[in-house]
Image (cartoon, rainbow, N blue to C red):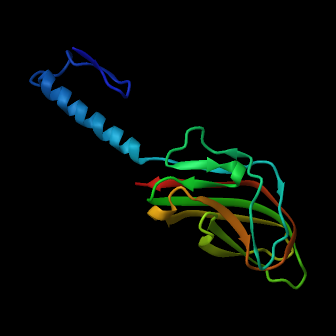
Amino acid sequence: MTTTYRSRVKLDLGQVPNGISDDILYRELLDIHNAIEQLADRVGGGGIVLTTPAAQSDLGAGWITIEDWTANSLADPKYVTQEFALDGFRFNVAETYVVSINITLIHNIVSGSSRILGVRLFNVDKATAFAATEVATPRAVDITNINLSGLLFEIPEEQAGDLFVIQLGGGGTYTSVSVNNSAFSAVILK
């Protein structure tokens, strides 16, 4: 007997070790197959990338949304709607996600200004900030790499489907700001 499962695994159940019936082997393989499908259903994510340098507004005490993302990071995202044209993405289900933010920021720091730069996730639909942190920018250097990974971010039911973006600001004064080679992504923990 030959059986093909949905996972495209083809098994010849006629060639089994002595003492194991086709029925027992079939049930065991079916259980393994179902467990693999359940695991695959739990994995998903998506994101957006910025691959072309994008000029941004000057930074100061207020907050700006990073604009001009250039592409979706996955061809077939799951549990996340990638919205690079809207500069963010949507978490489709109320669940816990692992969020990663990687930003290469080119800038000038205004003399005498604080070298502290805030980074946060912002829910555009609810006008609410989440996961805010501060980054110290180097003295006399015009480039700052910001890498925030492994951030656990819980989306409640009332925020599933809302648009989330990355915002910068809340600190020192920066001019001639450009974002280069950056990524914003999330993976669901389900």
Q: Nearer the viewer, residue 63 or 73?
A: 63
Q: Is residue 46 visible?
A: no
Residue at the limit of the structure toward the left, as seen here? 19
Q: Is residue 85 visible?
A: yes
Q: Quadrant of residue 179?
A: bottom right
Q: Nearer the viewer, residue 155 or 126?
A: 126
Q: How far across and down, in percent of the image, does residue 168 sit?
A: 73, 69
Q: How far across and down, in percent of the image, does residue 144 sit?
A: 77, 66
Q: Quadrant of residue 3?
A: top left
Q: How far across and down, in percent of the image, does residue 18 sit?
A: 11, 21
- Give above or below for 135 relative to 71: below
- Give above or below for 116 relative to 144: below
Horizontally, residue 185 falls left or right of residue 113, namely: left
- Give above or below for 97 relative to 18: below
Q: Quadrant of residue 175?
A: bottom right
- Give above or below for 129 relative to 97: below
Q: Residue at x 51, y 63 (%)?
A: 159
Q: Residue at x 50, y 45 (%)?
A: 78
Q: Residue at x 21, y 19 (%)?
A: 13
Task: Say how many tags the image has.
Answer: 0
Quarter of the figure with the N terminus:
top left
Residue at the limit of the structure toward the bottom, as seen here? 112
Horizontally, residue 151 falls left or right of residue 36, namely: right
Q: How far across and down, in percent of the image, does residue 84 sit?
A: 69, 49
Q: Nearer the viewer, residue 165 or 117?
A: 165
Quarter of the figure with the C terminus:
bottom left
Q: Residue at x 67, y 54 (%)?
A: 183
Horizontally, residue 20 falls left or right of residue 11, namely: left
Horizontally, residue 99 falls left or right of residue 70, namely: left
